[in-house]
Image: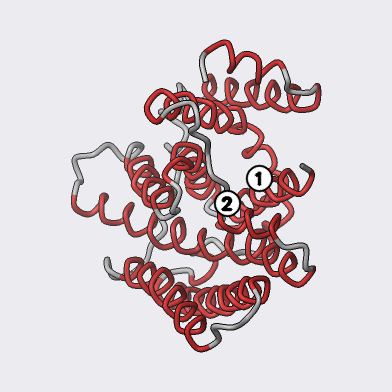
Amino acid sequence: MNILEIIKQLNNINITEAAICLTGLFLLARWLLTTSLGRNALADSIPRRNNMPFYLPFVLLFLWFGSVPLIMLITQQLLPDLPDWQNALLDNLILCAGAILTIILIIYLAGISFVRRLKGFGLNAKTIHRDFFAACINLLSIWPLMLAAILATIYIGRHIFGQDFKLEQHEELELITAYSQLSVRITIIIIAVVLAPVLEEMLFRGLFQTMMRSFLEFRFSNIQPRYTPWLAILISSGLFAMAHANAGHWPALFILAMCLGYSYEKSGSLLRSIFIHSFFNAITIIAVLAQ
């Protein structure tokens, strides 16, 4: 893909998509101007007091990424003759069960680790309506950046790996297009739109980002307070992107994660980042099914 091809792809964007991108650019420009290019954006961000041990997020990360694939592998060995679509359904049911159990565990640990319990963790039902609408604005403001990251990744990839390079779809998106069975599609939607956003935001933002901010503020007191939240966001965003198997998606996922982390630090509400994550996954699924 050369520059002319990129321009051609941009010309193929319809009026609605162009309006969304222009609105997002306006919101991003306004944010940059009002926050001194982001330097003052988190100046009033309040640390979340907690007694969480440093290793806790890593243990939960290992538990999720280690145990669930292992259970899937064992199940496949025990039931080798299932049709492909039933294998996909079973794997997704295991994912659902594993995600629910991990979410329950995280909620319990957050309740005993954060000073204000679940409210200190960022779960407060009273902020749902405010977080819902703010999430729409936040996602809209970074949409053009994610689109640019995708185009840049394809451009660089084709120069390095050849003109046949293309971004692979997420495994769940491949499954939802490969199998038309309603049960498979329902479980995928539940995982992508509900369980994965809740689990990943609790883990990467709620626990890991909080732990990193507390660690940086304790160990590196010479860092200006307004920069500490950004460093925690950068580290947790990098981990979030690399936790996804397809490296080609990392740049766009990193931008999304920066938005998720910023939204959490700015609002103090984990619900806001959960909504952003859920909206993004839902839009992606709708776009794939509409093709």
Residue sitting at 43 percent across and 48 percent down? Answer: 241
Q: Which of 69/43 is in front?
A: 69
Q: Secondary structure at mark 2?
A: helix
Q: Position of residue 191 (x, y in %)?
A: 63, 65
Q: Residues within 10 Å of mark 2 (few under 14, many from 20)?
A: many
Q: Quadrant of the C terminus?
A: top right
Residue sitting at 48 percent across and 69 percent down? Answer: 116
Are circles 1 and 2 on residues that touch, CB within 8 Å?
yes
Residue sitting at 38 percent across and 59 percent down? Answer: 208
Amino acid residing under circle 1: Ala
Is residue 90 found left or right of 130 in the rendered image? left
In the picture of the structure, the residue carrying the numbered disc 2 is 273
Q: Which of 104/21 is in front?
A: 21
Q: Position of residue 15 (x, y in %)?
A: 81, 21
Q: Residues within 10 Å of mark 1 (few under 14, many from 20)?
A: many
- Identify the disc placed on residue 135: 1
Is residue 276 found left or right of 264 in the rendered image? right
Q: Residue furthest front?
A: 81
Q: Position of residue 168 (x, y in %)?
A: 53, 44
- Identify the disc placed on residue 102: none
Q: Which of 103/115 is in front?
A: 103
Q: Position of residue 81 (x, y in %)?
A: 59, 83
Q: Secondary structure at mark 1?
A: helix
- Count of all numbered marks drawn on residues in the image: 2
Give the vertical position of 11 relative to 177 (above or below): above
Give the vertical position of 207 relative to 158 (above or below): below
Q: Earlier in the sequence, mark 1 or mark 2?
A: 1
Q: Residue furthest bottom?
A: 78
Give the vertical position of 150 relative to 267 (above or below): above
Q: CA–CA distance between discs 1 and 2?
A: 7 Å
